[in-house]
Amino acid sequence: MFDKQLAKKAAENLKTIREKKPLIHNITNFVVMNYTANILLACGASPVMAHAQEEVEEMVSFAGALVLNIGTLTPYWIDSMLKAGKKANELNVPIILDPVGSGATKLRTDSAKQLINDLSVKVIRGNASEVLSLAQEGSKTKGVDSIHTVDEATEAALTLAKELNTTLAITGEVDLITDGERTYRVSNGHELMGFVTGTGCAATSIIGAFLAVDDDSVEATTTALAYFGLAGEQGASRAKAPGSFQTASLDALFTIDGRQLEEGAKIQIV
Amino acid sequence: MFDKQLAKKAAENLKTIREKKPLIHNITNFVVMNYTANILLACGASPVMAHAQEEVEEMVSFAGALVLNIGTLTPYWIDSMLKAGKKANELNVPIILDPVGSGATKLRTDSAKQLINDLSVKVIRGNASEVLSLAQEGSKTKGVDSIHTVDEATEAALTLAKELNTTLAITGEVDLITDGERTYRVSNGHELMGFVTGTGCAATSIIGAFLAVDDDSVEATTTALAYFGLAGEQGASRAKAPGSFQTASLDALFTIDGRQLEEGAKIQIV
Amino acid sequence: MFDKQLAKKAAENLKTIREKKPLIHNITNFVVMNYTANILLACGASPVMAHAQEEVEEMVSFAGALVLNIGTLTPYWIDSMLKAGKKANELNVPIILDPVGSGATKLRTDSAKQLINDLSVKVIRGNASEVLSLAQEGSKTKGVDSIHTVDEATEAALTLAKELNTTLAITGEVDLITDGERTYRVSNGHELMGFVTGTGCAATSIIGAFLAVDDDSVEATTTALAYFGLAGEQGASRAKAPGSFQTASLDALFTIDGRQLEEGAKIQIV
């Protein structure tokens, strides 16, 4: 039922992260900086947060991936993201974008679209509304008004991924990953994840760590989300409320080994 | 001994928050953003942090309440608060202010007073020094020099609430809530709360969630503080040091049900 | 084997902090603000985070120590640090600097050096690369390229401490503290500390608390690091993964008493 090859690759990617400890450069929001850094450390990667325009180009040159997250954006931060992103593109450092709140305010939608237009972004991860708000005017994608589930979003996502020439990850109860050609679903995870702030942002950074060791954007993203969701499942087996759940999930990211991940990954080819 | 009607209302308000999941727009300090967001999620509300002047008006238009907290203020952030606040007033979105450190530096005192003067603020929550520092020059309120306890602050608070035409919540070992006419005390809570940073800020955001579902500012504030204090009590019954106490209290906010709150609320009419 | 006099002083310093509750003014990075504040509260000190140029001078005038941390620096924040630092020097409030990432980007190295040149800094704490990157051009200190351990760094640190006329703390598996004359090693700690973000920054703030009650910079720093490392050891005896370890270590900072610290401090004179 679940794809065994990708489950195996998930385990391999995790092993490589723990061996290589790639530096993940995050330009992210204030709410999740601490949590994201701890998530990346637990996973085996090496996080850095740096947003000053005077240093982002230098910092990203050491990085295995660049994570851009607009959760508490201002124009200064978007400019920093553009500066870091252009350098990342020059150096072939993969970029992953988390368009937090795109579709909710004009600033967020416009900023997300600008980042996508001006940079070559490998992966975009968000919820269905966020991702589908990125369709350009005149897009073949339908509006998001009637789209509420990952299921309903699948067709729109396929079209949009091709238009944007990127990998899209729409996360929710089930995660959908597609580049318009290949499409996977990941059904790992637990509903308590929705009661911890920044779970989506953390997933994005974990995808960054997987991208740093796996050139195949679709597979890196899919395996990262299986790993992150499995940690949520393990956390929920030990804790029943958000505070202790967050702690237990963070522990699980650290303790999950290759065999557990290979056996626990719930990845399906669509 | 304790007021049963308000205890019942506390349970009703909590139930409504969990049903309606009101969006609480926070313009708050860097120290507590993550903690506050998790507190609001555990309570059942939906937090958003947004401070860019380009989007605060749009964001607050979706919100059930606007929380303003000056804990790591700069002039830019105060201007954002004013912009969001004016829009909130236009749309009748209730505003709650946490004047962190007012009285400690001129910037904080002046900024808090400007927010109060330029906006219609429904509730102000702080410790005794912070709240009483808000008295305007020529106020009938006595200075804060000789006021160290919630008890001593009661009379000054009644006068000040009338002058400012708002609800004041002075939190401490016992919480005092007054609009100058009605006055309540809440004796829920635990001393370990003082060893977790941002407990006061978190209380303010919880009041925001209760204001989003209860038009009566005094009752919304009083019931919110009983709920928040009860979570502290439950946390302290499970953990004896600040790290595990914070986790246990966060869990308690999530697990407390209506019956527990109705039975555990320690609200008294003064 | 371990120095008993300094172990005793560690216990005395901790007791004094818990009695006097010194205000520690932090101008620090976004990643660790919450964690640092909780660390200082657990230790018994009173944290404040304030960076606005309009208030830093006023705020630092109430403080027992000023902690400067460049982890998410921008030029505005460095200017705030300089402003607060000059006032601190005027008032003899001790300054401790955490040059996060110095050596990694020009902005960080230059900013750290500017702070050191323009201010009188009592203590600098970092890892070996960070601290040794602070050598001025023409310094007698060797470059950092060949220096990877605290052991290898010792000689360079002694020279640099004399040149900078300050106390250096190089933390790692074993911590090295020197002012160029007296040198100590602290071997408390646990490897899990490397999997929690901001552990180094937290150590810096704890040193700030000890500096607020102990005029002897070398002894304040050494005793602070023994205390902080012992909390890590106790945390690791209760938890085996980063999430629960962080909680348990924070608890330990709160529960460690004088006798435990005196018996557990692993301080050696070099």
Image (cartoon, coloured by chain):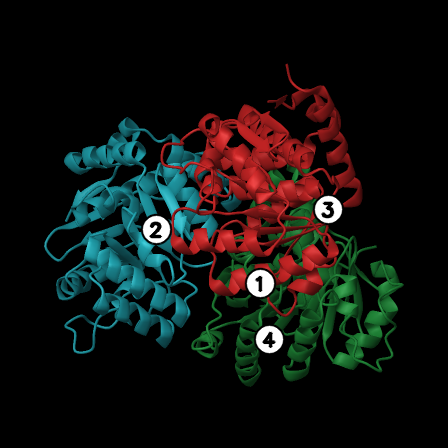
Chain colours: A red, B cyan, C green
Q: Is residue C201 left or right of residue B116?
A: right
Residue C94 marker: 4
The residue that label 2 is drawn on is: B25
The residue that label 1 is drawn on is: A80
Which mark is in front, 2 or 4?
Answer: 2
Could you give the CA–CA distance between mark 2 and mark 3, rounded to whole angstroms? Answer: 40 Å
Q: Quadrant of the C terminus of chain C?
A: bottom right
Along the viewing direction, whichever of A194 and A115 lies nearer the viewer: A115
Q: Do the CB atoms of the residues marked 2 and 3 lie less than 8 Å apart?
A: no
Which mark is in front, 1 or 2?
Answer: 1
Along the viewing direction, whichever of C206 and B107 lies nearer the viewer: B107
Which mark is in front, 2 or 3?
Answer: 2
Label 3 and label 4 in one chain: yes
Q: Do the CB atoms of the residues marked 1 and 3 lie less than 8 Å apart?
A: no
N-terminal-most mark, 3 or 4: 4
Query: Vertical placement of A182 versus A38: above or below?
Result: above
- The kind of residue tagged 1 is Ser
- The kind of residue tagged 3 is His
Q: Position of residue B81 (x, y in %)?
A: 33, 63
Could you give the CA–CA distance between mark 1 and mark 3, rounded to whole angstroms? Answer: 36 Å
